[in-house]
Amino acid sequence: MKVLFFGPNGSGKGTQGAIVKEKLKIPHIETGVIFRDNISRGTNLGKEAKGYIDRGELVPDSITIPMILDRIKQKDCVNGWLLDGFPRNLTQAQELDKALKKEGIKLDIVIEIMLERQIAKNRIMGRRLCVNDNNHPNNIFIDAIKPDGNRCRVCGGELITRADDQDEKAIDKRHNIYYDAKTGTMAAINYFKELSVKNKTPRIIELDGKPGVKEVSEDLLKKLL
């Protein structure tokens, strides 16, 4: 299975992506990891990407997409892959689609976690970290894992916040890109949905991100298999 996974920051995409990876036994491909790997190995694409990164510029699609293609052609991707974090806009979706078709690679599934923007923002800003164990789930905006005051709901430990979780400007900037239905990530998702209607592929799986992690996971597995 060759899968694209979409969801806004705060939707629990990382958690659900890990479930897809484990269930389908396919590698989880992230562009950030691909960049670091190519740069560390000193590939030609890695050297080009490093130049842009060092200048604080975005790495162009003409470099990113060949890196992705190189990665998904590796042996561990023979049974499929889960691509997360790309494409982020309509142009990237069009260019990725064109590149996959040129290579004869068929995209099977597009998964989208749907979540209202304000709820996604609240979930990011509502995250609390337990000083005893960061894996203890606590969020002041999610009833199922709401802490007891400023104490961890699992062990009673003190809770703290991550600075970037409270950076509204940074959150809004990321969400501005994601929820942009004209040129942003939502436009990219809609592009693949239009392809699905036209060509009957890829299969589109839409998930309601409002329920708890368990409920979303159950819905995902039911629709995936």
Image (cartoon, helix red, strand yellow):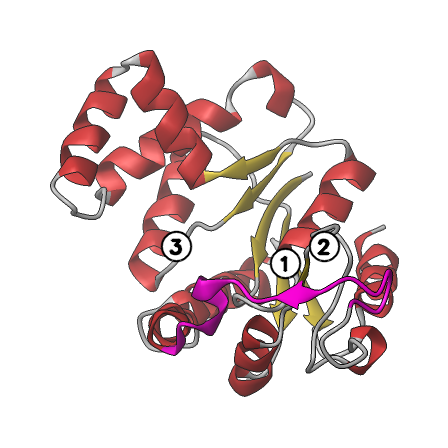
Q: What is the quadrant of residue 55 in the picture?
A: top left
| Residue 35, percent from left and from top | 35, 31
Judge left or right: residue 44 versus residue 30: left
Tell me the amino acid under the disc marked 1.
Answer: Lys
Quadrant in which the N terminus is drawn:
top right
Examine the structure image and report whether residue 204 is included in the region drawn in magenta: no
Q: What is the quadrant of residue 27 in the picture?
A: top right
Question: Residue at (74%, 68%) from the top-left corner?
Answer: 138
**Residue 142, placed above or below residue 91:** below
Q: Are marks 3 and 1 in contact (CB under 8 Å)?
A: no
Tell me the amino acid under the disc marked 2.
Answer: Gln
Q: Residues within 10 Å of mark 1 (few under 14, many from 20)?
A: many
The residue where tag 2 is placed is 16
Which is more toward the observer, 151 or 15? 151
Tag shown at residue 93 = 3
Q: Specify the segment rendered in magenta.
A: 152-168
Tag shown at residue 13 = 1
Distance of mark 1 from mark 2, alpha carbons?
A: 5 Å
Q: Earlier in the sequence, mark 3 or mark 2?
A: 2
| Residue 51, percent from left and from top | 14, 31
Question: Residue at (29%, 58%) from the top-left corner?
Answer: 91
**Residue 75, placed above or below residue 65:** above
The reply to whether residue 180 is in sight is no
Which is more toward the observer, 149 or 54? 149
Question: Residue at (78%, 75%) from the top-left corner?
Answer: 147
Examine the structure image and report whether residue 162 is included in the region drawn in magenta: yes
Judge left or right: residue 14 versus residue 8: right
Tell me the amino acid under the disc marked 3.
Answer: Ala
